[in-house]
Image (cartoon, grey):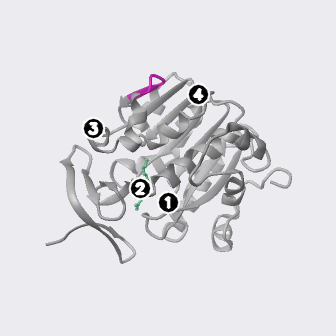
Amino acid sequence: MSLWAEERHDAGLDLRYRVRRTLFSEESEFQRIDIVESEGYGKMLFNDGVVMISERDEFVYHEMIVHPALFVHPCVKRALVIGGGDGGTVREILRHPSVEHCRLVEIDPAVVEGCKKHIPQTSAALADPRVEVSIADGVAFVAETDERYDLVIVDSTDPIGPATPLFGPEFYGNVRRVLAPGGVVVSQAESPFYEAERQRSMVSILGDLFERVRIYNYSNLTYPGGLWSFTFASTGDLCPTGDFDPARVRESGFEFEYYGADVHLAAFALPAFQARNLSRRLTPAKGRG
Ligand code: AG3
């Protein structure tokens, strides 16, 4: 008998992964959480049957959601992660020595618990003394907190269930409120193939609230279609390409699996179909950016 874990996608697509064993299954207040050991992708986390991470390719997503902003912002001291209970985003943020405090706000304790038990590759970072984990609704958190951050990362699942408000204007109004002057917000922005309309809506919501708005791409192994995006928005004039200094990446001495100075710049170059879809709302790059 063979066991499969599958992600069933709306577009008539089914992605199936052969499972060696199931490590964790829980029906939480918010969603169903499964952690499995797969045949070819290491351990995998599914929320409501949607792939969140695989050990095999999580480096792509986590490096790309974090480093472009941290290498463009002059000095991120305080970072806020909404979602991302697996800890991968926090792990990459903590590599930057300027970071003094990182708060993770995850709505579902079962995600943090399951990953702490079974996926140390990402979750070990959550034990770092610079990190504070809050089990809370990120939407309410940004509406209520007095804290201010240099960087906010919205490390969300697809716009379904508890994540839906994380794609809306009210939430981003409050994200803007918690950002320090010159602050940056980076958000999980789905697939340019499957979610063209969602990308348009995100870019337009951000465009109403932020000074600069761009979108950039990464290519991974486990999300439907492979090519996925993040939005980048800043409250000040910071341009993710024009204000990017490749020497900073080299001087960091960091070793990456995916990100790098060339990848940084290339990621903001959009395929024509995506650029056309978003053209009306994106901020032009500064200089030759
Ligand atoms: N968050 C990205 C979820 C998007 C995946 N969508 C999908 N498979 N249809 C992952 C959290 C990693 N920290």
Report if the CB atoms under discs 2 and 1 are less than 8 Å apart: yes
For disc 1, the neighbor class at 10 Å (few under 14, some 14 to 19, many from 20) is: many
Identify the disc placed on residue 113: 3
Mark 3 or mark 1, whichever is nearer to me: 3
Mark 2 or mark 4, whichever is nearer to me: 4
Mark 2 vs mark 1, CA separation in Å: 9 Å
Residue ID for mark 4: 99
Identify the disc placed on residue 190: 1
Q: Secondary structure at mark 1?
A: loop
**Residue 117 location (% of width, % of height):** 27, 39
At horizontal 13% and vertical 72% (from top left) the residue drawn is 1
Quarter of the C terminus within the rendering: bottom right
At horizontal 46% and vertical 65% (from top left) the residue drawn is 221
Mark 2 or mark 3, whichever is nearer to me: 3
Relative height, residue 234 to residue 229 (above, below): above
Mark 4 vs mark 1, CA separation in Å: 27 Å
Report if the CB atoms under discs 4 and 1 are less than 8 Å apart: no
Report if the CB atoms under discs 4 and 3 are less than 8 Å apart: no
Instruction: Pick out the residue farthest to the left.
Output: 1
**Residue 260 location (% of width, % of height):** 66, 51
Identify the disc placed on residue 159: 2
